[in-house]
Image (cartoon, coloured by chain):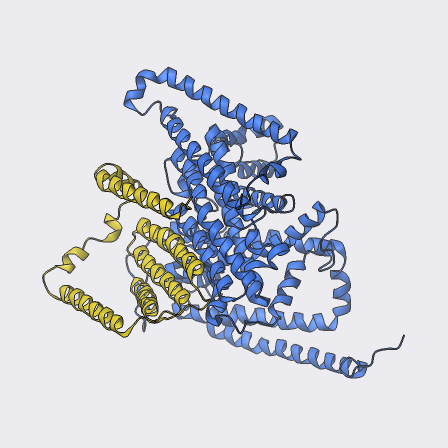
Chain colours: A yellow, B blue
Amino acid sequence: MDDLAFYIFAAISVGSAFGVVVSQNIVRTALFLLGTLGGVAGLYFLLDANLIAVIQLIVYAGGTLILIVFGIMLTSKSPWAEFKPPKGQIVLAALVGLLMFIGITSLTLSGDVNWAARATKTPLATSPKVAEAGEALLTTYLVPFEVASVLLLVVMIGAAYLAKTEK
Amino acid sequence: MASITLPWVQRDTEKLSNYRERAIRLLAIIALAHIPIILGAWLLLDPLSTKPADLQDWKVLLVPPLCLGSIGGMLLFAGAAFAIYAYELIGRVLSAPWVAFVIFIGAIFGIVIGVWLHAEILMTVQRDWMPAKETSVIPVVGIEYDHTVQSIYQNNLAGKSVDFPLIGAISIDTPILAYLMFPLQFPLIRDLVGVGGIIGFISLIPGFGIWWERKVAGRIQSRMGPMRAGGWHGWAQSAADGIKLAFKEDYVPPGGDGLLFRLAPYITFIPPICAFIALPFATAWVFRDLDVALIFILAMLGIEVMGVILAGWASNNKWSVYGAMREACQMVSYEIPMGMALLIPVMTAGSLSLTGIAEAQSGGFWTWFVFVNPWCFLAFFLYYVASLASCKRAPFDLPESESELVAGFLTEYSGFRWSMFFFGEYVAMYVVCGLAAILFLGGWMSPFPASSAEWFIAQANIENGMLQTLVKSLLAANPIWFILKATFLFFVQLWIRWTLPRIRIDQVLYACVQVLLPATMVVLLCNTVWTLGVSENGLNLGWLIALDGIINKILAAAGLLTLLGIVGIAAYGYRNNKKLVGWLAVDQLPGK
């Protein structure tokens, strides 16, 4: 049953990711991105990582994606903005993608990392509950957490500065 | 007046009655044709036999469709034949006001009892059906299962499952019940049954909500609202509307993006339904008791906006795009105060699971979070205002403001796709009201703790056993309380829509960024201090122990001042109730 669900979510993610790359209409691209993010969230749910799945949905699917679409609608010049990169870029992107693919698959298939040993830890037994995750963030990983929040603050101040009207 | 003689309107009475007779005859023959099927199936399957050898698992595939299905089919066709035969009489009976009222009330009670039985059976299966030592295997597919029909019947697993609150346990113990309960041992089937229950409840909400909204609108505007469809106060209005909408033309603007235009209603409609996956109705009455239920529901409400934006964009119509832009603006900004206001009960309960938060409020209405401290009291109203904006309800219904934008993002939509947006909107309204009920109003807890039932019974001198059980079950935590509270908040949303005027988009953003957001931040901060300072288990901060008394006094003073402030603001608002709109309208135009 879990296998079937895995294949469904994987098919949604990969199919929509392909759509993101191939589609030329920029709003459709955003829609496909929603499919990818949702599919990956589904995979997280299957792994019983509820917190990450839900954060994925609320931050990326519910927040970032809407901001992207909002930005497109505000900035595009014509209603049907086409997305046509030059051929050189397509070749370059395809090369980079191919390299990544070869790298990841060779790493997965080679015996360097013992995936089977890692997989024996069942997600159900080890997945942290929300309270534990929160406690870890505010004790063990406090410095990275604070650095990330300072970074976000800087970004926000920068955005406010850029958006300020000249006087 | 000349009679209209259109060829297709002319009524050939002789032909018509001829058709009627033929239809009745046909239906009666079909109904009678079921009898040999029933008899044959009965002889072959013998579903009432209690001999162990006769209780075979393969019969599960045949007993429900052949025995029950053919009996049901026979009754259906016979009923249809009777309805055509006696339609005049039936029509006269149905149009009497009290009959419609009885149907309406009966439908509500029937649905409640149906849902209750549903939950009761599912809970019994999960609780009582222990995994057996030996498992059986379905031959071709290879799925293992624990309980054969024989063991279900012999261990009385099916019969025990029905336990009525007033009548007591009824042991309906026929092999047919064992056949019907057999599939429920598979988790997938149980999930499907649960999804069926959710979808059933969800399809009730818009049907009832739209009719109710029209009645409320009518009453507030000193008229009656829909009165015709169905008889009693137009109770069938939503059904009539639904049928009308389903038969309308499905128009897709040729200049727009057809794919996105067709897809957008689904993206608006599905996320609010998904929110019901994690929304508990009572302790065990939840499809999946997620530990992150609250964030999950918020995420689902956030994704819903995507559909509205796509709808506006794909319509290729300036009014639609204006509506979509307003929606995007409004949603992205109101999500922040809404999420922060929801953090306050989470912090007070110390749990992110909705079940846990509701359990923390089980001691009567004075332990509900809305009354537990002044900051939660404020947070409830802040959340409610933000939730109005997130459901695009008045006074924040700018995305579809009829008076300025034709219909906003809905301009190009018609027929069934249009109605899907409304389904989504009403379901989302119910979800935010349900959240408010769980987080602030005690969820499925009754206003008085369950232990007070004895006291009530002693005071009122109730000696009748049934009445005593009734009082006890009313005061126990149960889904009725949740539905009542959520429905009341839903009603307040309707009430506000027909009372307050729509505000302008710059006022919407001003209200969010400069009023709601700072207010929520202050309340959040104060609640943090309050929760740390006045904990039920005494003080839980080491360095505060020395200052216990002083801090309690300071907090009490701060709380008192806030309460006085709330009363003062309310009094100010009441005295200046005519001026508020004018005050909001001052100097907020973008050019100034």
Image quadrant where one finds the C terminus of chain B: top right
Q: How many marks?
A: 0
Q: Is residue B246 above or below residue B408?
A: below
- Residue B164: % across, % down: 53, 47
Residue B164 in sight from this viewpoint: no
Is residue B512 at all visible to an observer of this figure?
yes
Quarter in which the N terminus of chain B is drawn: bottom right
Where residue B26 sits: x, y (%)? 66, 80
- Residue placed farthest to the front in the image? A167
Q: In this view, which residue lies farthest toward the left?
A: A112
Picture coordinates of residue B290, whole percent (x, y): 37, 48
Q: Can you say whether B251 is above or below B187 in the image?
A: below
- Residue furthest to the right in view is B1
Q: Is residue B9 left or right of residue B313?
A: right
Tell which of B276 and B310 is nearer to you. Answer: B310
Against B242, residue B159 (above or below) is above
Q: What residue is drawn where x is 62% and y is 63%?
A: B242
On the image, which quarter does residue B193 sit in?
bottom left
Q: Looking at the image, which is closer to me, B304 or A146? A: A146
Q: Is residue B564 above or below residue B299?
A: above
Q: Is residue A15 left or right of residue B121?
A: left
Q: Is residue B221 left or right of residue A82?
A: right
Where residue B91 sits, quadrant-wise, is bottom right
Q: Nearer the viewer, residue B568 or A150?
A: A150
Q: Picture coordinates of residue B125 (x, y %)? A: 41, 53
